[in-house]
Amino acid sequence: MKLLITITFIACVFISFQATDPLKESIKRGEEVYADFCKVCHMPTGEGMKGVFPPLAKADYLLNNREESIKAVKNGQKGEIVVNGATYNGLMAPLGLDDEEVADVMNYILNSWGNSSDKMVTEEEVSKVE
């Protein structure tokens, strides 16, 4: 009987942990933010528009410039950047997102379309980016 109770307890803890994975929850919320604010320019697949809107899919810039990427989502982006070897020189207006929305959409982008990041972007991290 003790073994059955122990197994049941461990299973419940495991299931509750799986159901509340903070990164998965953030990615889910970020997908909605992306659909509302980013999809029009960067496309549903994150491919962007060559020469106009940089890709987010398999984007070296995102992984190599984490703080600058957060800053662009938080405050907008102006000027030249190089993504996957192509130069983009445009303007992305500030989207008016709060720090949690920025963190969520960054987690979605960093874990979609061939991108992968084990390090979760947090609201606290976003709040420190000027």
Image: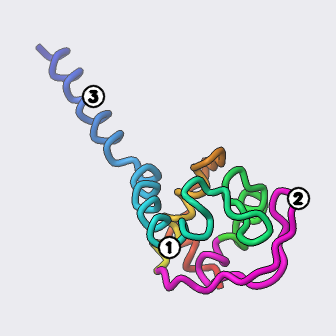
The residue that label 3 is drawn on is 10
Extreme-left residue of the structure = 1
Q: Residues within 10 Å of mark 2 (few under 14, many from 20)?
A: few
For marks 2 and 3, the one nearer the N-term is: 3
Q: Residue 53 location in percent, x, y?
A: 71, 70
Cα distance in 3D space between marks 3 and 1: 41 Å
Q: Which residue carries the number 1 mark?
A: 37
What is the crowding at mark 3: few (fewer than 14 residues within 10 Å), some, or many (at least 20)?
Answer: few
In space, the residues marked 2 and 3 are separated at their CA atoms by: 49 Å
Mark carried by residue 85: 2
10 Å crowding of disc 1: few (<14), some (14-19), many (20+): some
As drawn, is 93 to the left or to the right of 22? Answer: right
Q: In what element is the residue under mark 3?
A: helix
* Residue at mark 1 to residue at mark 2: CA–CA distance: 25 Å
Secondary structure of residue under mark 1: helix
Q: Amino acid at mark 1?
A: Phe
**Horizontally, is 19 left or right of 31 in the view?**
left
The image's mark for residue 64 is none
**Does 118 sit above or below residue 95?**
above
Q: Are marks 1 and 2 in contact (CB under 8 Å)?
A: no
Q: Is residue 21 magenta?
A: no
Residue located at (61% from left, 70% from top): 41
- The quadrant holding residue 42 is bottom right
Task: Specify the amino acid type for callout 2.
Answer: Gly
Q: Position of residue 73 (x, y in %)?
A: 61, 75
Looking at the image, residue 13 lies above or below residue 26:
above
Residue stretch in magenta? 70-97
> Pointers 2 and 3 in contact (CB under 8 A)?
no
The picture places residue 78, in percent across and down from the top left corner, at 75, 85
Q: Amino acid at mark 3?
A: Ile
